[in-house]
Amino acid sequence: MCGIVGYTGPREAFDILIEGLKKLEYRGYDSAGLALQDGDRIRVVKAAGSIAALEKRVRGQIKPLQVGLGHTRWATHGRPTDENAHPHLSCCGNFAVVHNGIIENYSALRDWLRDEKGHVFRSETDTEVLAHLLEEFYAGDLLEALRRTAEIVEGSYAMAALSAHEPGRLVCARKDSPLIIGLGEGENYIASDITALLSHTRRAYILEDGEFASVTAEEVKISRAGGEILQKEVFTVKWDAVAAEKGGYNHFMLKEIMEQPTAVRETLRQRIDTAAGRVNLNELNFAPEELCALEKIYIIACGTAYHAGLVGKYAIEKLAGLPVEVDLASEFRYREPILLKQKHLVITVSQSGETADTLAALRLARRKGVRVLAVTNVVGSSVAREADEVLYTRAGPEIAVASTKAYLTQLIALYLVALYLGDLRKALPSEEAARLVRDLDRLPGLLKQILAEERLSELRAYADRLARWENAFFLGRNLDYAVAMEGSLKLKEISYIHAEAYAAGELKHGPLALITEGIPVIVLATQESILDKTLSNIQEVNARGGAVFAVIPEGRGEIARQVEGAFYLPPVKDLLAPVLSAVPLQLIAYYAAVARGCSVDKPRNLAKSVTVE
Ligand code: F6R
């Protein structure tokens, strides 16, 4: 998740690019930069930090120039530093590139360019190889060089380039990452997102995978890899600027819920090998002996990330046979935990990587000589910098305060760790590991089924009824209990309905006294192995007049008949069910908050990143 904007025309490019980047800042904002054509050379200005900081630094320092590319970065490879910011230049400085996505074979390409072709690299990014490849392949036509580059790179990209050899021309291509060409009068644009262009044009070509574009002020030519020119329809944008930023959704939270299939796919990318049936976490530099010698793991986190940790505990204990303790960071740091060097490993889970309590817990573990693995979404965050090893979730920037896609990707990261440890410690038969790897690979597709429009209306109808209540309960057993806790947090934080989650078996030990006529009780019943037990709890609630809405496996119509409402999940292994069952709960919370007129993306009293105790 980064942002690209490009301009070619008679006006001053600097203002257009900076304004466009500011519109894209919500896509990622750890560093930014511009490349401007200046006669027979390219001027690049870029820096870590915000776009406003870059603007302040550069405004008035460069003469008016009319053609350029801009980029706002959300780091995936390499920390957010000046050098790693885009655009990237080739060795000779005549080719500049901006890129969104991940070049998966960048390491092999970089070795080839450096060792066999003598190129010198300045950054740690995957993107820089693109600039060097353009220089390597250039034979008088920039688009042709881009085609040859696209032929050998693997991964996902929206990439745009300019060259000092071809003034006035921008070229671009896409695969699995959005890119559009904005159409003006005597000027044209490139952007990863229409939001960047709305103050200039509402007319655009939408580039599809495998398509290339050559863009000058007078002309836009779109072609396929083989060079065949395409006649594309002009798309006219009807959204206003605010709606465009949210991808047409009313709230970032809904947009982020909808992004979950992609976020999960990205987090799995290159980390599972379905053919070999294995997990590949080569990015972690733990010695195998070190992981085999472990006797216990602590998972430490706050809020939603803590709830992800609870699922991680089940997964690691089941697949790796290793005891796991899950702790709230704010408790852990003040309770003098027993931390044993070489025997224990601490896993911190944090979307932002800046949560003060999580960071303090991490430091405590390291002071005691215990190694720390960070699961985080933000490259270069404090937690990422201070941990021994990092496993990044690749959810992209999460803007809504209520965490959704980050949670799902945290679950995925923890399943990967569990499978990895299970394999290494020989605790998991290889056939079972292979089955689970294949099941992980199916999750993005199953998530898409859950997010289909007709499924959303079922949940919206239920949430409208729930919105009239001031109290609600969530019940579940084992993994369903962990998800119930997350569902309850989601509901209370954005709709302000008081919600409690209970382990279903605990009902009789107190909470049953609260069940009165009509009170909403959301029951998670996805764990086939203990379904009968949860069904008994549903009967207990029914007998006291509670109104049960159950999340159940497909094909269990007999349960649906015993409850007021039900949401069916597509078939999935018990262990992986949380990835699917959390989604209807996110949507129920979202629709209930909307029905109650709450400020969904910025709930009262809450902040996205809790950097104070
Ligand atoms: C709830 C939510 C919070 C965060 C918590 C930890 O929707 O987002 O509970 O999960 O503040 O934040 P991170 O993951 O950034 O450490």
Image (tube, rainbow, N blue to C red):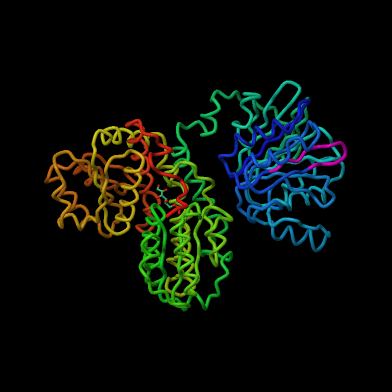
Locate residue 156, reporting x and y percent: 63, 48
Q: Does the stretch in magenta take in 39?
A: yes
In this orientation, which residue lies closer to the viewer: 485 or 147? Answer: 485
- Which quadrant holds residue 515? top left
Q: Is residue 211 visible?
A: yes
Q: Does the stretch in magenta take in 27?
A: no
Residue 150 position (above or below residue 504): above
Q: Residue at x 60, y 37 (%)?
A: 24
Locate residue 194, reporting x and y percent: 60, 31
- Which quadrant holds residue 36? top right
Q: Is residue 17 left or right of residue 238?
A: right
Q: Is residue 270 left or right of residue 431?
A: right
Spot the residue most to the top. Answer: 185
Part of the protein shown in magenta: 33-43
- Which quadrant holds residue 6? top right
Q: Is residue 443 visible?
A: no
What secondary structure is the magenta-colored segment mainly? Answer: strand
Could you tell me which quadrant the N terminus lies in? top right
Locate residue 233, reporting x and y percent: 64, 25
